């Protein structure tokens, strides 16, 4: 058989075609791998409502002067943080906590029922992927949301504490990391389990 016979040419052509196929396949795999790094990162900032007026006969009190000052501190801290969406519950204390921030950013406050944590989580993970979302909740709903997003377990915030903040970063493939910190004037730590929203 001479080198110019059809069989070696066919073999060479087959090798070249398969080589090109695997090169293209490899490029697609590499592209897909690096494309995952550009998937949106979602950041959820969670705070309990600020200090409220103590009015035993009023289930929906306004913020106290200390609470209003804390709300202003949130506006100062996050006015330039790229917040895209703001959520609060149906209670005045959560709405007033985010009002200065919403006003400074020109955003409306989205109202969600305090008992509908599952619905809020669904909205965050489907409608707001890749955004920075600010949520004002309650001493039981805030740790509940942080726990659901991260898989970690966070206890109910004591009634006396208003200075806790959870920043949850949800990475690609749903992995999440939580940073828990304090902000504003310090609260009295660890007193009472609170009047939780059920």
Image (spheres, rainbow, N blue to C red):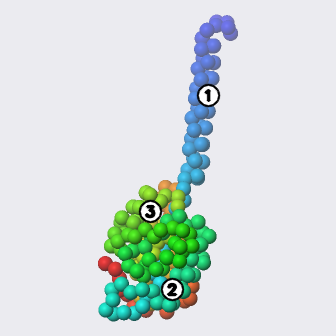
Task: Give the residue at mark 2.
Answer: 68
Q: Nearer the viewer, mark 3 or mark 1?
A: 3
User: Picture quarter containing residue 112?
Assistant: bottom left
Residue ID at (36%, 84%) = 60
Spatial CA distance of label 1 from label 2 is 66 Å
Which residue is denoted by mark 3 in the rendering? 124
Question: Distance of mark 3 from mark 1, alpha carbons?
Answer: 43 Å
x, y percent for residue 86: 48, 69
Circle 2 Cα neighbour tier, 10 Å, few/some/many (<14 / 14–19 / ≥20): many
Q: Looking at the image, can residue 72 be seen?
A: yes
Quick one: label 3 or label 1, which is nearer the N terminus?
1
The answer to whether the residue labelled 3 contacts the one labelled 1, judged by CB atoms less than 8 Å apart, is no
Under circle 1, the secondary element is helix
Residue 152 picture location, percent across and down: 45, 71
Q: CA distance from mark 3 to mark 2?
A: 27 Å
If the image is split into quadrants, where does the N terminus sit?
Answer: top right
Question: Which of 19 and 77 lies nearest the eye of the viewer?
Answer: 77
> From what the image shows, is residue 149 above or below residue 40?
below
Query: Closer to us: mark 1 or mark 2?
Result: 2
Seen at 55% across and 50% down, the residue is: 36
Q: Residue at x 54, y 56 (%)?
A: 40
Q: Residue 121 appears at what percent x and percent y? A: 40, 65
Q: Using the image as rendered, state which of residue 102 and residue 179 is in the foreground.
A: 102
Relative placement, left or right, of 23 versus 173 is: right
Quadrant where the C terminus is found in the figure: bottom left
Could you tell which of marks 1 and 2 lies nearer the N-terminus?
Answer: 1
Residue 145, located in which quarter of the rendered image? bottom left
Q: Which mark is residue 20?
A: 1
| Sequence order check, earlier mark of 3 and 2 | 2
């Amino acid at each position: 058989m001479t080198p110019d016979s059809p069989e070696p040419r066919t073999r060479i052509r087959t090798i070249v075609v398969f080589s090109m196929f695997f090169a293209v396949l490899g490029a697609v795999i590499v592209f897909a791998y690096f494309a995952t790094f550009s998937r949106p990162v979602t950041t959820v900032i969670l705070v309990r409502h600020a200090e409220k007026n103590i009015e035993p006969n009023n289930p929906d009190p306004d913020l106290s002067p200390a609470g209003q000052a804390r709300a202003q501190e949130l506006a100062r801290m996050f006015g330039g943080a790229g917040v895209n969406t703001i959520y609060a519950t149906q209670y005045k204390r959560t709405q007033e906590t985010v009002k200065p921030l919403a006003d400074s950013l020109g955003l409306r406050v989205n109202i969600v029922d305090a008992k509908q944590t599952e619905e809020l989580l669904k909205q965050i993970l489907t409608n707001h992927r890749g955004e920075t979302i600010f949520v004002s909740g309650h001493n039981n709903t805030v740790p509940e949301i942080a726990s659901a997003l991260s898989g970690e377990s966070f206890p109910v915030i004591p009634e006396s504490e208003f200075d806790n903040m959870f920043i949850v970063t949800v990475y690609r493939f749903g992995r999440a990391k939580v940073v828990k910190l304090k902000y504003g004037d310090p609260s009295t730590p660890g007193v009472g389990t609170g009047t939780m929203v059920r």
